[in-house]
């Protein structure tokens, strides 16, 4: 498997594009990969399809065989040597195939179930693809489930579609249209790939069935057509190394190894490499470059073949010392003869420290922990979109010291004393400590589950706060007395709401100037216990809501109520009792959304009335 020494890259010296597959659970990602891998030629690895580490390699001859049924529709001219398909479907591997925020995946397949349309993780995938500016095609999968579908296994879509009955064609058209509309709502123009005249603006849709293999030739053909037509620049063979760590794994006989996708250049045994580690940069030397033993040679002792040298694009297992703390999703750099190792160490740690830009510098926010750099980055992007502030980030398992960071929020904003953890282990002690302190830990391996759990928790806390502070959340109002209905036991006043709104529970007062000290004195008349308009009870009456006047009943359990006619009378303006504390309570997230702009303006006016700084 060793490759010849590098030659000068020429115009046609392209490398294989790398392809990832993602989409909602159960749309058929795994099944599609299986189907693509299966060869219709007899005899093991016919056509040279090879299993690599974390990926499957399709040499161009295998692609040609698999896309034969496309010949009647499209020209098949291939410039690239093959196609590298990443084996693990989903967000995780896509987001780990990254280099400084851009994607190393040259083309992605977004799978949508034609019977289900767009689902939660479809949206998440679209967001990811867009954030990373990754080109993609839509595989509209499970067409064999259309009612009355007559399968022709492994046929090109147009060929099998022609043979379908009218009902099938109609159902297909209706479902396709609905999905195109749903994609448009996500800001994506889309078109069946063979009707797509504008590849730059429209996403191509390929109808497929992972069960019958129909549409698979189309999918493969399109992946190659698109990559070589639209991105041959990115596929230019470069001698410098571009590689990302997909996974860190312990393998018997090799210790901790890293599974690497090499997207450009060469790796050689003995190369000195630099990578990002949990506790700082790792510098080590490649001890072995391993690829899987070909199927028919499995009777050989070792599971792996040792390679002196490997060439992009491929998936390879790297064995070396000191890989225990290597971070998945970070880059792997090779130290060349003229390179400054120190500089490369800083450079590679930027993958992690670069993410610190997403951290709120005011020290307010949640603590985020993820298993890999890619998922951490994806989660941070998501939280940014959702406007959830992040105070601190981390990688790997959650320990007590990570929880301690979150406890800092307990006093400032309890709803943010939260850890959002993506696919990580939580240490027992850390879990106990969090429970003791009142820090909530959420752990999930699907971003939107994490988000849903977090928002539900926040809403629950806010609801509790609304209950706890109801008495202190005083909305502003100004009232004029129309008539006094009952002077005492209980005091009932007919009022007109001049500004704001009066609510049941609001304390009502008037403000007088003390004749001796000339200071403002607040006289509390009592809390509103009921509001009636024409004998109908209301919880709240806004300015302008009625011309009839409101019968407002007040209660003052303190028994210190001023006497109507002596301390207070019809000429006095009445207000809700505003204090510094009541204003601050309204600013709390529990109430903030209920306070209108005119309420804030009125509050500002009332601050003068009540002489609040
Ligand atoms: P993943 O979660 O996206 O990887 O989905 P899977 O590949 O595990 O498929 C989920 C289920 O859908 C499995 O039961 C598959 O057999 C089934 N499935 C996948 N693709 C197709 C398809 O094209 N047609 C039909 N009828 N079933 C499919």
Image (cartoon, rainbow, N blue to C red):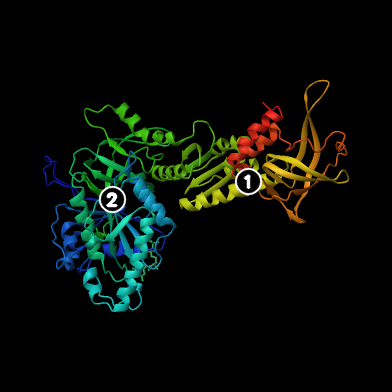
Visible in this render: residue 374? yes
Confirm if mark 1 falls within 8 A of ligand 1: no
Q: Are marks 2 and 1 in contact (CB under 8 Å)?
A: no
| Residue 453 sits above or below residue 9 on the image | below
User: With 33 as the anchor, is 25 left or right in this view?
Assistant: right
Quadrant assignment for the C terminus: top right
| Residue 188 sits above or below residue 38 on the image | above
Ligand 1 resides in the quarter of the picture at bottom left
Give the CA distance from mark 2 to mark 1: 41 Å
* Residue situated furthest top in the rendering: 517
Q: Where is residue 80 drawn, in percent x and y?
A: 16, 52
Instruction: Return the residue at label 2.
Output: 135
Visible in this render: residue 254? no
Q: Where is residue 398 drawn, in percent x and y?
A: 52, 42
| Residue 463 sits above or below residue 39 on the image | above
User: With 306 as the anchor, is 123 left or right in this view?
Assistant: right
User: With 452 as the anchor, is 155 left or right in this view?
Assistant: left
Label 2, secondary structure: give it: loop
Question: Based on the displayed image, in which of its 4 quarters is residue 502 positioned?
Answer: top right
Q: Where is residue 254 drawn, in percent x and y?
A: 34, 45
Determine the residue positioned at 29% across, 28% down.
Answer: 341
Camera-side residue of 472 and 274: 472
Question: Based on the displayed image, in which of its 4 quarters is residue 69 positioned?
Answer: bottom left
Q: Residues within 10 Å of mark 1 (few under 14, many from 20)?
A: some
Label 1, secondary structure: give it: helix
The dot on residue 462 is 1
Q: Where is residue 110 drawn, in percent x and y?
A: 33, 57
Which sits earlier in the primary sequence, circle 2 or circle 1? 2
């Amino acid at each position: 498997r060793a490759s010849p020494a590098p030659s000068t890259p020429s115009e046609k010296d392209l490398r294989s594009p790398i392809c990832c597959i993602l989409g909602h659970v159960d749309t058929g990602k795994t099944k599609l990969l299986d189907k693509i891998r299966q060869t219709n030629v007899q005899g093991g690895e016919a056509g040279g399809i090879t299993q690599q580490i974390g990926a499957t390699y399709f040499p161009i001859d295998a692609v040609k065989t698999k896309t034969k049924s496309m010949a009647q529709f499209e020209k098949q001219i291939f410039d690239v040597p093959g196609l590298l398909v990443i084996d693990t479907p989903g967000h995780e591997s896509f987001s780990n195939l990254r280099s400084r925020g851009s994607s190393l995946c040259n083309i992605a397949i977004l799978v949508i179930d034609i019977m289900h349309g767009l689902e939660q993780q479809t949206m998440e995938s679209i967001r990811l693809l867009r954030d990373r500016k990754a080109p993609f095609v839509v595989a509209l999968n499970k067409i064999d489930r259309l009612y009355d579908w007559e399968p022709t296994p492994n046929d090109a879509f147009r060929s099998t579609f022609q043979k379908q009955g009218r009902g099938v064609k109609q159902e297909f058209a209706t479902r396709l249209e609905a999905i195109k509309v749903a994609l448009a709502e996500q800001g994506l123009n889309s078109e069946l790939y063979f009707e797509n005249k504008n590849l730059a603006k429209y996403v191509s849709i390929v109808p497929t069935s992972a069960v019958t293999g129909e549409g698979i030739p189309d999918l493969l053909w399109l992946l190659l057509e698109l990559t070589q037509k639209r991105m041959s620049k990115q596929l230019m063979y470069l001698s410098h190394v571009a590689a990302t760590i997909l996974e860190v794994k312990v393998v018997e006989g090799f210790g901790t190894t890293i599974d690497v996708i090499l997207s450009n250049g060469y790796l050689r045994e003995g190369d000195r490499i630099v990578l990002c580690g949990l506790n700082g940069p790792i510098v080590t030397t490649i001890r072995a470059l391993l690829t899987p033993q070909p199927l028919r040679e499995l009777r050989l002792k070792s599971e792996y073949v040792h390679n002196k040298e490997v060439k992009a694009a491929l998936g390879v297992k790297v064995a070396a010392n000191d890989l225990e703390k290597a971070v998945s999703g970070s880059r792997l750099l090779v130290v060349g003869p003229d390179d400054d190792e120190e500089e490369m160490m800083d450079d590679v740690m930027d993958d992690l420290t670069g993410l610190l830009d997403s951290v709120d510098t005011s020290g307010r926010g949640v603590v985020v922990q993820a298993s890999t750099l890619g998922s951490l980055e994806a989660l941070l992007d998501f939280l940014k979109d959702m406007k959830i502030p992040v105070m601190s980030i981390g990688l790997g398992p959650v320990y007590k010291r990570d929880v301690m960071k979150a406890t800092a929020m307990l006093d400032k904003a309890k709803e943010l004393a939260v850890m959002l953890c993506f696919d990580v282990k939580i240490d027992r002690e850390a879990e106990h400590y969090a429970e003791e302190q009142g820090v909530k830990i959420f752990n999930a391996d699907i971003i939107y589950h994490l988000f849903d759990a977090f928002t539900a928790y926040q809403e629950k806390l806010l609801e509790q706060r609304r209950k706890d502070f109801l008495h202190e959340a005083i909305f502003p109002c100004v009232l004029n007395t129309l008539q006094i209905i009952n002077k005492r036991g209980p005091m009932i006043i007919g009022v007109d709401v001049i500004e704001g709104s009066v609510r049941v529970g609001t304390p009502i007062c008037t403000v007088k100037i003390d004749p001796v000290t000339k200071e403002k004195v607040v006289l509390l008349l009592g809390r509103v216990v009921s509001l009636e308009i024409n004998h109908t009870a209301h919880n709240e009456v806004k300015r302008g809501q009625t011309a009839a006047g409101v019968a407002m009943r007040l209660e003052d359990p303190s028994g210190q109520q001023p006497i109507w006619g002596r301390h207070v009378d019809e000429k006095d303006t009445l207000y809700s009792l505003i204090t510094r504390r009541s204003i601050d309570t309204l600013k709390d997230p529990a109430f903030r959304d209920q306070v209108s702009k005119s309420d804030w303006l009125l509050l500002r006016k009332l601050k003068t009335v009540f002489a609040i700084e």
